[in-house]
Amino acid sequence: MSRWAVVGAWALAATFGVAGTAAAVPPPPPNPSDSEISSSQTQANAKANEVGQLTNQLAQAETRLSDLADQVELKEEQANKALVDQQTAEDAASQAQADADAARRESDAAAQQIEVARKQLDDFIAGSFQQGSTMGSISAYLTSRSPQDLLARAQLLSSVSGSQLNALQLMEQAQTDKSNKDAAARAALEVAQQKQAAAEAAKRTADAARAAAVQAQQSQAAQNATLEADKNSVEQQLYAAQQRVAGLQGQRQRYQDWLAQKQREDEQRAQQAALTASKGGGGGGAAPPPSGSTSSLIDRVIARAMSQLGVTYAWGGGNAYGPTRGIHDGGVADAYGDYRKIGFDCSGLMIYAYGGVVSLPHYSGYQYTAGRHVPLSQMRRGDLLFWGSSDIHHVALYLGNGMMIEAPESGMVVRVTPVRYGDILPYATRLVG
């Protein structure tokens, strides 16, 4: 039989052997051994370390995934640029092709006009001159009325042939210009087609780079999902281990509370018996307030909180004596039926944890000002942590080693979890010490 069991048995014997008016204390609750508590705590610590390692790995993986997401975004933009450049090059090549086609048509049309004019000139020359005489103009000479008229007609024929030659030369010059334009247009088309080919090659390269970046991102996301699943699994194991530790510690605390209460009652019974014997009657004294070192008080606070692990969340629930029925909030809590549940909300759990040590109001904002503020870098076991940069909306009890206990929200239960630093206030509230 353990030492505590002997003390308990002695206390029970004293209870029934001494008359008095004090209320009877219930039978002693289970009292786990130190080795059981130590072993379960060691297992929980091992799981906590594993969770910490997986959390670090996941954080690094999330960083890599974020970097890969940035790379995908960059490659997508580069692919978009390549697509725009390709479209621009295709438009330029199409326009160059149209210009080259137009220049070729103009050049061909000019060449045809020159051929027609040259044939007409050849026909005129063949009809007008033969063997050094103007055979094609014989009628002009025969019908002339005077030498002056004959000379005038000869000059007219010469003028006509000269004019045709001059027109032919002008047409040939125009044809040369159009040929030059045709050559320039074809050269521009060749350059445009080269640019189009380069743009298409650049787009293929950009598309391949984007596809590779997307593949890398998807692969990393799959790795992250695996790490997240592993972390969740180990967290569940940690939660189970912590519940076992909390359950054993809660049993130990309930036993110690029972023993302390029993000892106080024994003292009261003894005092009552002494007064009765000496004065023939008298009243008993009240129980003394909590006493002891800061460390022991904090251990008691944490043990009381941990003894409520798994208790249902109920908005407005909880007091110094334990869980109570929730109340209506006209919103989310009502949707979860909190007003029908027996449990704690976040500030109600703090009231119970510090019950008998510090009296706290049932509002996290007032609990924040109920003690001394210390920077988070100096927080220690038993401190209250708060969230809400503009308006406080949550409170939890710090357990040490980066862990805390809280009544989180409707639909959940009292739990132990790593401290969340998002939206946390920079100061913790210290109620003891």
Image: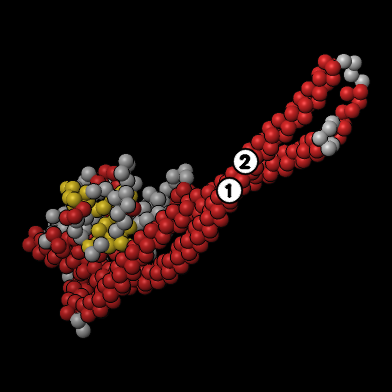
Q: Residue at x 50, y 54 (%)?
A: 79
Which percent across, then down, holds residue 423?
32, 49
Q: Say which amino acid is labelled 1.
A: Ala
- Badge 2: how crowded within 10 Å, few (<14), some, or many (20+)? some
Which percent across, then down, holds residue 302?
24, 62
Q: Nearer the viewer, residue 47 or 300?
A: 47
- Badge 1: how crowded within 10 Å, few (<14), some, or many (20+)? some
Badge 1 is on which residue?
187
- Give me the C-alpha separation between circle 1 and circle 2: 10 Å
Quarter of the image for the C terminus: give it: bottom left
Of all residues, the one furthest to the left in this rendering is 278
Q: Residue at x 87, y 15 (%)?
A: 146
Of all residues, the one furthest to the bottom in this rendering is 1
Quarter of the image for the N terminus: give it: bottom left
Q: Nearer the viewer, residue 176 or 402?
A: 176
Q: Is residue 91 above or below residue 310?
A: above
Classify mark 1: helix, strand or loop: helix
Q: Residue at x 28, y 75 (%)?
A: 46
Q: Residue at x 22, y 63 (%)?
A: 400
On the picture, is 195 further left or further right than 403?
A: right
Q: Nearer the viewer, residue 395 or 374?
A: 374
Q: Nearer the viewer, residue 287 or 138?
A: 138
Q: Mark on residue 181?
A: 2
Q: Would residue 212 be visible to someone looking at this image?
A: yes
| Cβ–Cβ under 8 Å for marks 1 and 2 | no
Q: Say which amino acid is labelled 2.
A: Lys
On the picture, is 9 further left or further right than 346?
A: left
Residue 276: name its quadrant: bottom left
Q: Is residue 305 above or below residue 226?
A: above
